[in-house]
Image (cartoon, grey):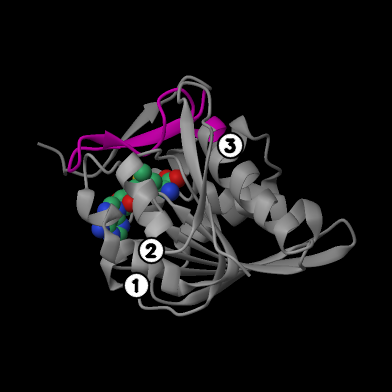
Amino acid sequence: MADSGPDLILTSDGSHSLRSPLFGESYHSLHGAVQESSHVYIRAGLAHAHERYNGASELSILELGFGTGLNALLSLLYALERGLSIHYAAIEAYPIDAELAARLNYASVLSLTEAESALFMEMHRLPWGKVGSLSTSRMGGETKMSLEKRHGFFEELSDEAAYELVYYDAFAPSVQPDCWSTEMVKKVRRAMRPGGVLTTFSAQGAFRRRLQAAGFEVERLPGPPGKREMLRATLPF
Ligand SMILES: C[S@@+](CC[C@H](N)C(=O)[O-])C[C@H]1O[C@@H](n2cnc3c(N)ncnc32)[C@H](O)[C@@H]1O
């Protein structure tokens, strides 16, 4: 038998995702990985937070589950378009290797330039446990993304008031309930700045109520194609 690392799969919008034999789950919606990430994390998350912080020139993002790096890549592309600087911290307990990352077809699906594709691979090659800097100049301005990849469990999160935006992208609550617990919600809330925004593909009622109990205002938004709803939770300023 080969190792029990994730398998490459194709989703309905033509973009790759992975399937974890460990959890028996895909990393993205089978209706479309790029479609889902763009909808849940970029449009409902990053674009909304950017507007909420009045077009700030810098934003700090926390991702629960680095996985394929697709959310980080789409965030970088958003930032490059707008001259935004991003500090991106991502927690991941089961990192994929660079060889598998190189097989993901995001460069062709997203029509990336060579420089952008190289940045995606650089994200995967950056060492865990360090803050790496990804930089390029485009549209007349230098845009930087610092990427901090943490090899560890979500449960170890202990940051305080550090992030304006959280991508809550663990496997579904039915698969790993501990990652969606009241304890986790409290840790994530503590890690966020006033006015912060959290988005997730999940629309689970119990998770929504935990967010509300922790002081978030929660919206149920239309999900990406194939999914009725998703959640966006916002902290007061
Ligand atoms: C739904 S996938 C999303 C991955 C990523 N955001 C992407 O777009 O590819 C969930 C990710 O969380 C990671 N993960 C699951 N449980 C974890 C835990 N307790 N602590 C840290 N990472 C975990 C998985 O290995 C996987 O990469």
Q: Residue at x 68, y 34 (%)?
A: 111
The spot of residue 85 in percent (x, y) is 71, 67
Q: Does the residue labelled 2 lie within 8 Å of ligand 1?
A: yes
Question: Residue 39's mark?
Answer: 3
Question: Residue 157's mark?
Answer: 1
* Mark found first going from the N terminus, 1 or 2: 2
Identified by mark 2, the residue type is Ile
Q: Helix or strand or loop: what does disc 1 sit on? A: loop
Identified by mark 1, the residue type is Leu
Q: Which residue is drawn at 21% across and 41% down?
A: 175
Q: Are marks 3 and 1 in contact (CB under 8 Å)?
A: no
Residue lying furthest left in this view? Answer: 1
The span from disc 1 to disc 2 (Cα, nearest Å) is 9 Å
- Neighbours of disc 1 within 10 Å: few (<14), some (14-19), many (20+): some
The residue at which mark 2 appears reads as 91
Inspect this view and state whether residue 153 appears. Answer: no
Q: In which quadrant will I find the N terminus?
A: top left
The spot of residue 161 in percent (x, y) is 51, 78
Magenta span contains residue 131: no
Q: Which residue is drawn at 23% across and 44% down?
A: 5
* Mark found first going from the N terminus, 3 or 1: 3
Q: Are marks 2 and 3 in contact (CB under 8 Å)?
A: no
Q: Which residue is drawn at 71% across and 43% down?
A: 113
Front-most of residues 154 and 185: 185
Q: Helix or strand or loop: what does disc 2 sit on? A: strand
* Start-end of magenta stretch: 14-35
Q: Do the residues labelled 1 and 2 touch (CB within 8 Å)?
A: yes
Left or right: 176 with respect to 49? left
Identified by mark 3, the residue type is His
* Mark found first going from the N terminus, 2 or 3: 3
Q: In which quarter of the image is residue 39?
A: top right
